[in-house]
Amino acid sequence: MSADARQREARVATLEQLLEVYERSVIEQSNKLYAEQQRMRLQTTLLESQGEASLDGILSSSVDGRILFANARLAELWGIEAPVIGERSYRATLGAMAERTADPAGFLERAAAAEAAQASREQIALRDGRTFDGYSAPIRSHEEELLGRVWYFRDISAVVEIDRMKNEFISAVSHELRTPLTSIRGSLDLMASGIAGTLPEEALSLTRIAQSNCERLVRLINDVLDIEKIDAGRMELALDRIVLEALVERAVEWMRPYAAELEVTLHFESRAPRALVRADDDRLAQVMDNLLSNAAKFSPAGQSVEVLLERRGPRLRVAVTDHGPGIAPDQHARVFQKFAQLDASAARRREGTGLGLHIARALVERLGGRIGFSSEPGVGSTFYFELPECSA
Ligand SMILES: Nc1ncnc2c1ncn2[C@@H]1O[C@H](COP(=O)(O)OP(=O)(O)O)[C@@H](O)[C@H]1O
Ligand SMILES: [Mg+2]
């Protein structure tokens, strides 16, 4: 064999080896690809069956308005034709849904606004009386690219109905309780006044206990009724221009006897005489009563409570400062919640319902103001509210 021929043979052998390596790598790659494909298929099936098994109606669309996914529940829930996946019918689907709502224009408007937002949530009233909870969020790639949007719709009619029944029940019971209670209170007051004959000391002290508990029940019932009105949006306000100083002055005078019983003195300083606010006299007095009674009942005997009325820019601020136990920072979030009584043992002596501040906040906010507090444990608390000042 010539040297040439040997060289050629060696080259062919190398090529053959190379080819074999390539072949192996191709087979390996295609096996991997196949496995990957299988995994993707499984993923898709899994996602689809999860989507189908959901009790929520699910709709996702791409940025160009194509339907990416819609489960059968969606069409069933809304009573619309099932959207076809892949079709550019997102707008049409939203339109069909809108027709089922009590306020189609509003629904479409809010849907458009939701599309610009991150995530959004709303309650949707339907024409047939049902209520849906609608949740929507953007779909983004790992690289944060916007791919589309997903919607979840849940029928919460039963929850809404139960809530309505609960409120109706509470309100009915409270009303029913109030009438006999008012009569009991009246009778007790008469008895204590001695109109039915002078009571022996023992009986008088029992009557006073009954009176004070009766007052407490009346307060509780009135608070519960107020909350119910606020939650149902039925709290009516009689707005008037009010001299804030006079209102605070009256509230402080009214609270004096109660504070005196607890050996607490009240001081009022006004730095905004004659300043006006637009408010409901009785309701604002109710806010003051609660701030003052809280300050008084959480003050140790012998302490004073300072009330300050002052201007803060365009607003008037009334602040009630006590030198009581204060409120621990981890309790701050709870103060305005319903039935919030932070320290149960301390609150027992200082009877209350835990509804006062919740009501106060709702009232102040309805009046266009805000309410807040600052507090240092062991030093005291300042609760305040602010209302826009009216021009004379
Ligand atoms: N001035 C205050 N000092 C300390 N804690 C307070 C003060 N005001 C309110 N709180 C806390 O907030 C809770 C809720 O107050 P509120 O809603 O008025 O209910 P209530 O007066 O019926 O207890 C009180 O029970 C108390 O724990
Ligand atoms: Mg209170």
Image (cartoon, rainbow, N blue to C red):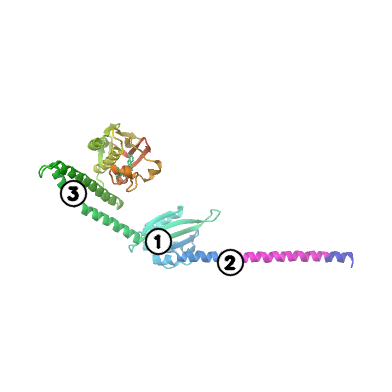
Crowd class of label 3 (few under 14; some 14 to 19; many from 20; radius 10 Å): some
> Relative to 235, is 10 on the left or the right?
right
Q: Quadrant of residue 327?
A: top left
**Closer to the camera in the image, 175 or 205:** 205
Q: Secondary structure at mark 2?
A: helix
Q: Secondary structure at mark 3?
A: helix
The residues tagged by marks 2 and 3 sit, at their Cα atoms, a distance apart of: 76 Å
Task: Determine the secondary structure under disc 1.
Answer: strand
Task: For the residues labelled 1 and 2, say whether their Cβ atoms are less than 8 Å apart.
Answer: no
Tag shown at residue 182: 3
Task: Give the numbered dot on residue 38.
Answer: 2
What is the total number of numbered labels drawn onto the structure image?
A: 3
Residue at the disc numbered 1? 154
Residue in the image at 15% along x and 41% along y? 201
Locate the C terminus and report the quarter of the image it occupies. top left
Residue interval drawn in magenta: 10-38
Whether tag 3 and tag 1 are in contact, CB under 8 A, the answer is: no
Q: Is residue 367 visible?
A: no
4 is higher (above) or lower (below) than 335: below
Q: Between disc 3 and disc 1, whose residue precedes?
A: 1
User: Mark 1 packing: few (<14 Cα in 10 Å), some, or many (20+)?
Assistant: many
